[in-house]
Image: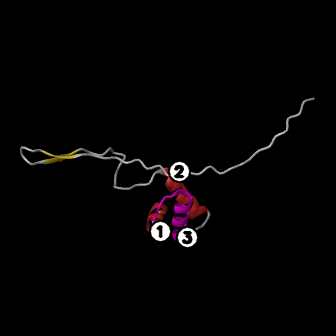
C-alpha cells in the first residue's frame, strides 16, 4: 500500500478594496455657451456608494460580531482600507 503524507499552510489572503469610478463629460458649446452633460448609468445613484461586499462585511462585524458602530468603522479601515464613518455604518445597518 502506498500512503500519501500531507502538509498544509493556511494563510489569510489580503482583501483589496476595489473602487470603480464613473465619469461623465460636461461640454460647453463655443457658439451658444450652453453646457450639456452625459448621464451616469442607472447603477450609479450617488457620488459614493458601497457595494454588496462592503455592506456584507459591515453587517457581519456589526450584527454578528456585535461591534459598536465606531469599532466597525475602525475594523473596516484596518482590514480592508475602507474608510467609513460610524454614521455610514449605521445607515448600512438600517
Asked whether the beta carbons under mark 2 and mark 1 sit within 8 Å of each other, the answer is no
The image quadrant of residue 46 is: bottom left
Is the residue 44 above or below the residue 68 in the image?
Answer: above
How many numbered markers are drawn? Answer: 3
* Disc number placed over residue 16 in the picture, else none: 2
**What is the span of residues highlighted in magenta in the rendered image?**
69-84
Q: Are marks 3 and 1 in contact (CB under 8 Å)?
A: no
Relative placement, left or right, of 30 versus 82 is left
Which disc number belongs to residue 86?
1
Q: Which mark's residue is nearer the viewer, 3 or 2?
A: 2
Q: 29 or 56, which lies in front? A: 29
The residue drawn where x is 80% and y is 43% is: 7
Residue 67 in picture, x, y percent from top left: 58, 68
On residue 65, the disc is none
Q: Circle 1 — which element?
A: helix
Q: Return the residue at label 3.
A: 68
For marks 3 and 1, give the CA distance: 9 Å
Percent coordinates x, y for residue 30 in the rendering: 9, 44
Amino acid at each position: 500500500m502506498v500512503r500519501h503524507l500531507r502538509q498544509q499552510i493556511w494563510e489569510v489572503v489580503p482583501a483589496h478594496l476595489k473602487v470603480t469610478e464613473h465619469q461623465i463629460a460636461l461640454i460647453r458649446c463655443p457658439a451658444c455657451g450652453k453646457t450639456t452633460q452625459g448621464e451616469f448609468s442607472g447603477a450609479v445613484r450617488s457620488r459614493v456608494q458601497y457595494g454588496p461586499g462592503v455592506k456584507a462585511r459591515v453587517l457581519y462585524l456589526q450584527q454578528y460580531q456585535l461591534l459598536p458602530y465606531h469599532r466597525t468603522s475602525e475594523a473596516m479601515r484596518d482590514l480592508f482600507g475602507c474608510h467609513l464613518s460610524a454614521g455610514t455604518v449605521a445607515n448600512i445597518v438600517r
